[in-house]
Image (cartoon, rainbow, N blue to C red):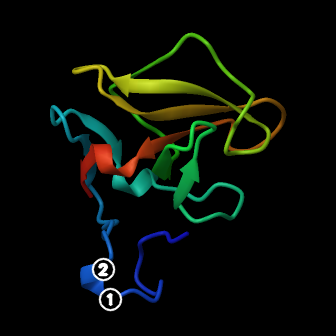
Amino acid sequence: MTDGKPGDGKAPEERDEIREEEGEVLRCRSCGAEIAAVEDICSIAGAPSLQHFANPEGALWEVLTVRHARGLVADVQAYSSFTWFAGYSWRMVACAACMEHLGWMYEAMGSQTPPRFFGLVRGKLSGG
Protein backbone atom coordinates (compact mmCIF):
# COMPACT_ATOMS: atom_id res chain seq x y z
CA MET A 1 0.00 0.00 0.00
CA THR A 2 1.15 3.52 -0.73
CA ASP A 3 -0.25 6.91 0.05
CA GLY A 4 1.07 8.29 -3.24
CA LYS A 5 3.10 11.04 -1.56
CA PRO A 6 6.79 11.92 -1.83
CA GLY A 7 8.98 9.63 0.22
CA ASP A 8 7.14 6.46 -0.74
CA GLY A 9 10.15 5.14 -2.65
CA LYS A 10 8.68 5.71 -6.10
CA ALA A 11 10.00 8.02 -8.77
CA PRO A 12 7.68 10.98 -9.54
CA GLU A 13 6.66 9.48 -12.90
CA GLU A 14 5.58 6.26 -11.14
CA ARG A 15 3.41 8.03 -8.62
CA ASP A 16 -0.11 9.41 -9.09
CA GLU A 17 0.63 12.57 -7.12
CA ILE A 18 -1.98 14.12 -4.93
CA ARG A 19 -1.14 17.74 -4.33
CA GLU A 20 -2.27 19.26 -1.06
CA GLU A 21 -2.40 22.90 -2.05
CA GLU A 22 -5.19 24.95 -0.52
CA GLY A 23 -8.17 25.25 -2.83
CA GLU A 24 -7.41 22.14 -4.90
CA VAL A 25 -10.48 19.96 -5.41
CA LEU A 26 -11.23 16.39 -6.41
CA ARG A 27 -13.93 16.09 -9.07
CA CYS A 28 -16.08 13.33 -10.48
CA ARG A 29 -14.16 12.11 -13.53
CA SER A 30 -17.46 11.45 -15.36
CA CYS A 31 -19.11 14.88 -15.07
CA GLY A 32 -16.67 17.25 -13.34
CA ALA A 33 -18.78 17.89 -10.23
CA GLU A 34 -16.81 18.95 -7.14
CA ILE A 35 -16.61 16.11 -4.64
CA ALA A 36 -13.94 16.90 -2.02
CA ALA A 37 -11.21 19.35 -1.13
CA VAL A 38 -7.70 17.93 -1.36
CA GLU A 39 -7.04 19.35 2.10
CA ASP A 40 -9.67 16.89 3.46
CA ILE A 41 -7.62 13.83 2.48
CA CYS A 42 -6.97 12.00 5.74
CA SER A 43 -5.52 8.92 7.36
CA ILE A 44 -7.83 6.54 9.20
CA ALA A 45 -6.44 4.60 12.17
CA GLY A 46 -2.88 5.46 11.12
CA ALA A 47 -3.21 3.80 7.70
CA PRO A 48 -2.14 5.58 4.49
CA SER A 49 -4.78 7.82 2.90
CA LEU A 50 -4.53 5.82 -0.35
CA GLN A 51 -5.00 2.06 0.02
CA HIS A 52 -5.85 -0.96 -2.11
CA PHE A 53 -8.69 -3.30 -1.16
CA ALA A 54 -10.49 -6.31 -2.64
CA ASN A 55 -14.19 -6.92 -2.11
CA PRO A 56 -15.66 -10.43 -1.55
CA GLU A 57 -16.14 -10.85 -5.31
CA GLY A 58 -12.44 -10.16 -5.87
CA ALA A 59 -12.78 -6.70 -7.45
CA LEU A 60 -9.79 -4.51 -6.59
CA TRP A 61 -10.26 -0.89 -5.53
CA GLU A 62 -7.79 1.96 -4.96
CA VAL A 63 -9.45 3.95 -2.19
CA LEU A 64 -8.64 7.49 -1.05
CA THR A 65 -9.98 8.46 2.40
CA VAL A 66 -11.35 11.97 3.00
CA ARG A 67 -12.94 13.62 6.06
CA HIS A 68 -15.64 15.50 4.15
CA ALA A 69 -17.27 15.18 0.76
CA ARG A 70 -20.04 17.00 -1.08
CA GLY A 71 -22.15 16.38 -4.13
CA LEU A 72 -22.77 12.75 -3.20
CA VAL A 73 -25.89 10.69 -2.59
CA ALA A 74 -25.68 7.72 -0.23
CA ASP A 75 -27.51 4.41 -0.39
CA VAL A 76 -30.21 4.06 2.29
CA GLN A 77 -28.91 0.68 3.44
CA ALA A 78 -25.82 0.58 5.69
CA TYR A 79 -23.75 -2.63 5.92
CA SER A 80 -21.39 -3.78 8.64
CA SER A 81 -20.25 -6.99 6.92
CA PHE A 82 -17.13 -6.98 4.75
CA THR A 83 -16.08 -3.53 5.96
CA TRP A 84 -12.53 -2.47 5.15
CA PHE A 85 -12.42 -0.30 8.30
CA ALA A 86 -13.02 -2.11 11.60
CA GLY A 87 -15.79 -0.54 13.68
CA TYR A 88 -17.38 1.24 10.70
CA SER A 89 -20.46 0.42 8.64
CA TRP A 90 -20.54 1.49 4.99
CA ARG A 91 -22.97 2.78 2.39
CA MET A 92 -22.33 3.10 -1.33
CA VAL A 93 -22.13 6.71 -2.57
CA ALA A 94 -22.63 8.12 -6.05
CA CYS A 95 -22.12 11.51 -7.67
CA ALA A 96 -25.37 13.46 -7.20
CA ALA A 97 -24.97 15.06 -10.63
CA CYS A 98 -24.42 11.96 -12.82
CA MET A 99 -25.03 9.02 -10.42
CA GLU A 100 -21.60 7.46 -11.10
CA HIS A 101 -20.54 5.19 -8.21
CA LEU A 102 -17.65 7.02 -6.51
CA GLY A 103 -17.09 5.00 -3.35
CA TRP A 104 -18.44 4.54 0.15
CA MET A 105 -19.43 6.56 3.20
CA TYR A 106 -18.22 5.03 6.48
CA GLU A 107 -20.03 5.63 9.77
CA ALA A 108 -18.72 4.65 13.20
CA MET A 109 -20.69 1.91 14.92
CA GLY A 110 -19.29 2.99 18.30
CA SER A 111 -17.10 5.77 19.61
CA GLN A 112 -14.48 5.63 16.83
CA THR A 113 -13.10 8.86 15.47
CA PRO A 114 -13.81 10.25 13.07
CA PRO A 115 -17.53 9.45 13.38
CA ARG A 116 -17.86 9.56 9.57
CA PHE A 117 -15.54 9.66 6.55
CA PHE A 118 -15.55 8.72 2.87
CA GLY A 119 -13.57 6.17 0.88
CA LEU A 120 -13.47 7.41 -2.73
CA VAL A 121 -12.33 5.38 -5.74
CA ARG A 122 -9.19 7.20 -6.93
CA GLY A 123 -9.68 6.21 -10.57
CA LYS A 124 -13.14 7.81 -10.63
CA LEU A 125 -11.78 11.19 -9.52
CA SER A 126 -9.86 13.89 -11.33
CA GLY A 127 -7.91 16.85 -10.00
CA GLY A 128 -5.89 17.21 -6.88
Q: Nearer the viewer, residue 128 or 12?
A: 12
Q: Residue type at mark 1: give it.
A: Ala
Question: Quadrant location of the C terminus?
Answer: bottom left
Residue 81 lies left or right of residue 11; in this view the side is right
Seen at 44% across and 43% down, the residue is: 120
Residue located beneath label 2 in the image: 14
Quarter of the image containing the N terminus? bottom right
Q: Nearer the viewer, residue 107 or 37?
A: 107
Q: Which mark is residue 11?
A: 1
Point out which mark residue 127 bears.
none
On screen, residue 1 above or below 66: below
Query: Element at badge 2?
Result: helix
The answer to whether 84 appears left or right of 74 in the picture is: right
Q: Are marks 1 and 2 in contact (CB under 8 Å)?
A: yes
85 to the left or right of 97: right
Return the residue nearer the eye: 67 or 51.
51
Residue at the image position 79 percent from the left and 39 percent from the top? 87
The residue that appears at 45% across and 26% down in the rendered structure is: 93
Q: Residue furthest right?
A: 110
Total number of numbered discs in the rendering: 2
User: In the image, what residue occupies the spot 83% across and 37% down?
Assistant: 111
Amino acid at circle 2? Glu
SS at circle 1: loop
Q: Residue furthest top?
A: 76
Q: Position of residue 117 (x, y in %)?
A: 57, 39
* Relative side of 94 to 26, left or right: right
Q: Is residue 78 above or below residue 123?
A: above
Instruction: Indicate the quadrant where residue 27 lies.
Output: top left
- The residue lying furthest to the front in this view is 57
Q: Position of residue 90 (x, y in %)?
A: 63, 29
Using a 10 Å C-alpha cutoff, classify the residue at mark 1 as few (fewer than 14 neighbours), some (14 to 19) or many (20 or more).
few
